Image: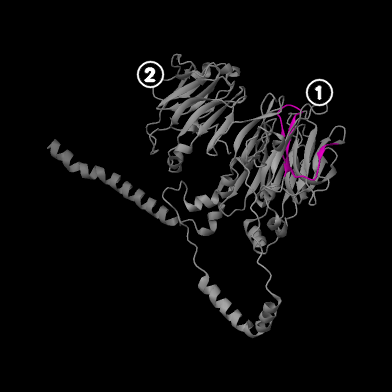
C-alpha cells in the first residue's frame, strides 16, 4: 500500500513543476513577440572603432586617448578623452588624429558626410578639406580650412599645414610624355607654419613635399621641395624654426621629390628629375646632405647618366623614395627599365591643291549624308568590351586593372654608397623583394617569380637568399620556403628567423649558418586546427626576443617557450613572462596577428 500510495502521489507532486514550466515558456514566447526586429532606419546606429590609421591612440604622456567611431550610416566622429576625469570632446567627421610630442595639442582632419561628398562629386565640385587644432590644456579649438596634410614639429611647438593644391589641367596631363610620373608628383601649394604658443603663421609657396627632421624632441629643421607650375624657383629649402633662417640647398628647373631624413641625424636625401630626348620619362639624380649645418657637412651627388658602370637601359625612379641605412653610409634607391621614346607617326602628305578644291566643292552636298551615316556607323561599330584572360595569367583581369599602377611602379633595389659615390644593384627581378637588414651590411631577398601562380591562389612560397650590400653577391638560404610572411630579423640583427616544414629556423647573419631550433622541442608550434587549405599550417606565433638576441620566445597552443637561436632549449616555463626581467625583453607580441615584418611594397 505504501508503494501504491507513492505511485498515486507522484503526478500531484509534478503538477506545480509542469505548471511553472508552461508559464515560463509562455512568458518567453510573449517576450520574444514583444521585441520587433531592428528596423532599417536604425541600422546606422551600429558603431565600431575605426581602423588603426584613424584611431589615434594615447598621447605621449598617457593622459589622453583619441579614437574614431565609425557608424553604418557613415556619420562618423572622433573622440578625445581625458583619461583622468573621463571628459570627452567629440568632433563630427574627425579622423587621423595626431598628438604633439609635448602632449599639449592634438590635430585632426575634418571631413563631411558621405551624402554631401557624393553630391559635390556629382556636381564636379571640390570636396572641402580642413583640420582642427585642440589645445588640451585650455580646451580651445580652432579650425583651418583648405588643408590637405599636417605634421607637428619634433618638439611639438610648431604645426606645418599644407593647403590643398589646385587641380592639374587636363592639357598638362595629356601633353606630358611621362604623365604617369607627373601625376604622382604633388603640385605645389602654400605651406603654413604655425607657432602654436602664439598662433602666428609663416607661409611658403609652391611646396609639394615637406618633412620634419627625424630627431625626437629636438629636431628643428623643416625640409621642403619647391615645385612651381613653370618650374621657376624649383629646389630644396631648409627652414630652421629656432633661428627662422631659410637655406636653399639646391635649385634648378627640375622636379624634386622623395624627401627622406635619416633617423636621429641631420642627414637628408632627395631626388631630382633629369630627362633627355631619347627616353620616356625622367631618370633621377640622387642628392644627399650629411651633417647639415655642421663643419663636417658634405653633399654627395649621384647622376646615373654620368656613371659608365650604371646598367644600360635602366633608370633610377621617383616612385621609390630614398631609404637611409641606419649608419648613414648607404642610401637605397629604386631601379627600373628606361624605355626608349617612340617616334611620332609620320603625318600624311598634303593633298594637291586641285584635289582640295574638289573636296571642298562637294563637302556641302555630302554634309547631311555624312552626318547621318556617321551616327549610324557609330552605333554599329561600338562593340561591347571583352576581357580575354588566359589560364596561364597569374592574375585575373579585374585584379590586373586594380594593380596596373603598382605593376608600372615595380622596381629593383640598389645601394648608393655615399663614401665611394658608387651604386650597387641588389635586385635581379621585379617579382622580388629586397629588404635591407638594420644592423648588417646585408639584405634579404625573397624571390617569388617561380611561384607566382601558387601565390595567386593563396599558397605563398619564395626562394630566400642573403645579399651582400657592398658587392651584390648572394648566399642561398632556402629554396621553396613555405611562407615568407614569417621571415623576420631579430632586433639586434644577429639572426634571421623563418618558419618552414613545421619548424622554426634561424640564419646566423655573420656565419650564414642555418639551424633548425625546434627539432628537439617536446611540443608543436603548429596550429593544426587551422582551416587554411595549404600545405604549411600556420604557427601559433612569436611573442618576442630577449635582450641582445639571446633567445626567442615562441608560442605553442597554450604556453610560451624560450628557445636559444643556436638550437639549445631552456626548460619549459609555464610562468615564463612573469619570470623574465622586463627591461631585458625587446618586445612582446600577442598571438594575433602573426608577425609579418618583411611584408613591404616594392
Front residue of 353 and 98 = 353
Q: Position of residue 107 (x, y in %)?
A: 73, 42
Image height of 358 relative to 118, above or below: below
Q: Is residue 272 magenta?
A: yes
Question: For residue 273, what is the image quadrant?
Answer: top right
Question: Is 338 situated left or right of 486 in this image?
Answer: right
Image height of 502 relative to 38, above or below: above
Q: Position of residue 94 (x, y in %)?
A: 67, 47
Front residue of 173 and 13 = 173
Image height of 122 relative to 5, above or below: below
Q: Main secondary structure of the magenta part?
A: strand
Segment colored magenta: 247-274
* Residue bearing the label numbered 1: 296
Q: Nearer the viewer, mark 2 or mark 1?
A: 1
Front residue of 584 and 160 = 160
Element class at badge 1? loop
Residue at 61%, 34% in the rendered image = 413
Element class at badge 2? loop
Question: Is 554 situated left or right of 467 in this image?
Answer: left
Q: Quadrant of the N terminus?
A: top left
Q: Position of residue 449 (x, y in %)?
A: 48, 38
Q: Position of residue 128 (x, y in %)?
A: 72, 55
Q: Quadrant of the C terminus?
A: top right
Residue 542 shows in the view: yes
Residue at 60%, 80% in the rendered image = 370
Q: Is residue 384 magenta?
A: no
Mark 2 or mark 1: which comes first in sequence?
1
Image height of 122 relative to 155, above or below: below
Residue at 47%, 48% in the rendered image = 395
Question: For residue 16, what is the image quadrant?
Answer: top left
Question: For residue 8, what is the image quadrant?
Answer: top left
* Residue bearing the label numbered 2: 522
Amino acid at each position: 500500500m505504501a508503494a501504491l500510495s507513492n505511485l498515486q502521489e507522484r503526478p500531484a507532486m509534478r503538477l506545480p513543476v509542469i505548471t511553472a514550466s508552461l508559464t515560463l515558456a509562455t512568458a518567453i514566447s510573449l517576450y520574444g513577440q514583444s521585441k520587433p526586429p531592428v528596423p532599417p532606419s536604425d541600422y546606422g546606429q551600429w558603431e565600431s572603432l575605426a581602423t588603426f590609421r584613424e584611431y589615434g591612440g594615447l598621447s605621449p604622456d598617457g593622459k589622453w586617448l583619441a579614437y574614431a567611431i565609425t557608424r553604418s550610416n557613415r556619420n562618423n566622429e572622433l573622440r578625445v578623452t581625458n583619461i583622468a576625469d573621463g571628459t570627452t570632446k567629440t568632433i563630427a567627421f574627425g579622423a587621423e588624429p595626431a598628438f604633439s610630442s609635448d602632449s599639449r595639442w592634438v590635430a585632426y582632419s575634418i571631413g563631411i558626410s558621405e551624402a554631401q561628398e557624393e553630391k559635390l562629386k556629382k556636381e564636379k565640385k571640390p570636396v572641402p578639406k580642413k583640420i582642427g587644432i585642440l589645445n588640451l590644456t585650455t580646451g580651445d579649438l580652432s579650425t583651418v580650412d583648405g588643408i590637405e596634410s599636417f605634421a607637428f614639429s619634433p618638439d611639438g611647438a610648431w604645426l606645418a599645414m599644407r593647403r590643398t593644391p589646385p587641380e592639374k589641367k587636363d592639357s598638362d596631363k595629356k601633353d606630358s610624355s611621362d604623365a604617369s610620373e607627373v601625376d604622382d608628383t604633388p603640385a605645389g601649394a602654400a605651406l603654413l607654419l604655425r607657432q602654436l604658443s602664439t598662433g602666428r603663421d609663416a607661409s611658403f609657396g609652391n611646396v609639394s613635399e615637406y618633412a620634419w627632421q627625424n630627431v625626437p624632441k629636438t629636431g628643428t629643421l623643416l625640409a621642403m621641395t619647391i615645385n612651381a607650375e613653370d618650374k621657376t624657383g624649383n629646389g630644396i629649402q631648409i627652414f630652421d624654426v629656432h633661428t627662422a633662417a631659410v637655406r636653399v640647398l639646391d635649385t634648378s628647373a627640375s622636379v624634386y621629390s622623395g624627401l627622406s631624413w635619416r633617423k636621429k641625424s641631420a642627414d637628408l636625401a632627395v631626388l631630382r628629375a633629369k630627362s633627355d630626348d631619347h627616353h620616356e620619362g625622367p631618370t633621377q639624380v640622387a642628392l644627399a646632405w650629411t651633417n647639415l649645418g655642421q663643419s663636417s657637412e658634405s653633399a654627395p651627388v649621384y647622376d646615373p647618366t654620368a656613371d659608365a658602370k650604371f646598367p644600360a637601359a635602366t633608370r633610377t625612379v621617383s616612385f621609390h623614395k630614398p631609404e637611409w641605412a641606419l649608419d648613414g653610409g648607404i642610401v637605397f634607391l629604386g631601379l627600373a627599365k628606361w624605355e626608349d621614346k617612340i617616334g611620332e607617326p609620320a603625318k600624311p602628305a598634303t593633298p594637291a591643291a586641285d584635289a582640295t578644291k574638289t573636296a571642298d566643292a562637294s563637302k556641302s552636298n555630302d554634309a547631311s549624308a555624312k552626318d547621318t551615316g556617321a551616327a549610324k556607323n557609330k552605333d554599329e561599330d561600338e562593340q561591347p568590351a571583352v576581357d580575354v584572360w588566359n589560364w596561364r595569367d597569374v592574375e585575373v583581369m579585374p585584379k590586373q586593372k586594380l594593380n596596373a599602377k603598382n605593376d608600372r611602379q615595380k622596381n629593383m633595389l640598389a645601394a648608393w654608397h655615399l663614401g665611394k659615390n658608387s651604386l650597387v644593384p641588389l635586385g635581379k627581378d621585379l617579382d622580388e623583394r629586397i629588404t635591407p637588414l638594420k644592423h648588417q651590411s646585408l639584405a634579404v631577398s625573397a624571390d617569388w617569380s617561380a611561384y607566382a601562380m601558387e601565390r595567386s591562389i593563396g599558397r605563398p612560397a619564395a626562394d630566400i637568399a642573403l645579399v651582400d650590400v657592398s658587392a651584390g653577391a648572394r648566399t642561398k638560404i632556402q629554396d621553396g620556403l613555405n611562407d615568407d610572411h614569417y621571415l623576420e630579423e631579430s632586433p639586434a640583427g644577429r639572426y634571421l628567423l623563418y618558419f618552414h616544414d613545421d619548424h622554426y629556423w634561424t640564419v646566423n647573419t655573420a656565419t650564414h649558418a642555418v639551424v633548425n631550433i625546434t627539432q628537439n622541442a617536446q611540443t608543436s608550434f603548429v596550429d593544426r586546427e587551422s582551416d587554411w587549405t595549404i600545405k604549411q599550417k600556420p604557427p601559433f606565433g612569436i611573442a618576442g626576443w630577449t635582450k641582445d638576441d639571446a633567445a626567442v620566445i615562441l608560442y605553442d597552443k597554450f604556453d610560451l617557450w624560450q628557445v636559444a637561436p643556436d638550437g639549445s632549449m631552456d626548460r619549459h616555463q609555464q610562468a615564463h613572462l612573469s619570470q623574465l626581467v622586463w627591461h631585458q625583453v625587446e618586445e612582446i607580441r600577442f598571438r594575433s596577428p602573426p608577425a609579418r615584418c618583411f611584408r613591404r611594397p616594392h
